Amino acid sequence: MEPPSAAPAPAPASDDEEASAFRALADPTRRQILEDLRGGELAAGEIASRFSISAPSISRHLGVLKGAGLVTERRDANRILYSLAEERLAMCVGRFLSAVCPEQIVLRHTKWRPAPEGDAS
């Protein structure tokens, strides 16, 4: 029996895919949905209950996020559960940030990464 192989690295986002992701991120409601999904999978009804807009409007927002590849969905009986597609989001935004302000990426990693155990620096 062969050992399980690592998941293949995701393909880089095309310009169209990246543009789709940024269009999806342009709306504050969609950004809030992504933040809410950071805590884990949520049912469509749970997501809708967090907003003062109609359930059909939330459904349209979820459709845009799904179309951009920023969320995934799965069915569980009569519920639709949504999850954040972290790698996709990180690839689209990260590629852009790396191209526009690479120094800030380095600073962020340096500033936010905790020092290794026993490192006095």
Image (cartoon, helix red, strand yellow):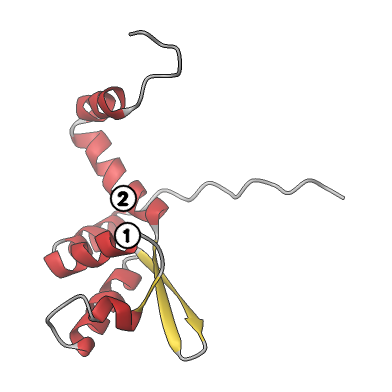
Label annotation for residue 66:
none
* Three-letter amino acid code at the position of disc 1: Glu
Q: Is 23 situated left or right of 65 in this image?
A: left
Q: Secondary structure at mark 2?
A: helix
Q: Residue at x 38, y 54 (%)?
A: 86
Q: Residue at x 32, y 60 (%)?
A: 17
Residue position for label 2: 92
* Three-letter amino acid code at the position of disc 2: Cys
Q: Residue at x 23, y 24 (%)?
A: 107
Give percent across and percent down for residue 3: 78, 46
User: Total of numbered circles in the picture?
Assistant: 2
Q: Secondary structure at mark 1?
A: helix
For the C terminus, the image quarter is top left
Q: Is 55 situated left or right of 119 in this image?
A: left
Q: Residue at x 83, y 47 (%)?
A: 2
Give percent across and percent down for residue 106: 28, 25
Above or below, comparing residue 31 to residue 43 in the picture:
above
Pointer 2 and pointer 1: residues touching (CB < 8 Å)?
Answer: yes
Residue 72 lies in what quarter of the image?
A: bottom left
Q: Nearer the viewer, residue 92 or 61?
A: 61
Residue position for label 1: 17
Give percent across and percent down for residue 50: 21, 75
Whether residue 27 is visible to the viewer of this picture, yes or no, is no
Q: Nearer the viewer, residue 96 or 51?
A: 51
Q: Earlier in the sequence, mark 2 or mark 1?
A: 1
Give percent across and percent down for residue 60: 24, 82
Residue 57 lies in what quarter of the image?
A: bottom left
Q: Nearer the viewer, residue 59 or 46?
A: 46
Distance from Cα at disc 2 to Cα at disc 1: 8 Å
Circle nearer the viewer, 2 or 1:
2
Q: Given the current orientation, which residue lies at the most extreme right position?
A: 1
Above or below, comparing residue 16 to residue 114 in the picture:
below
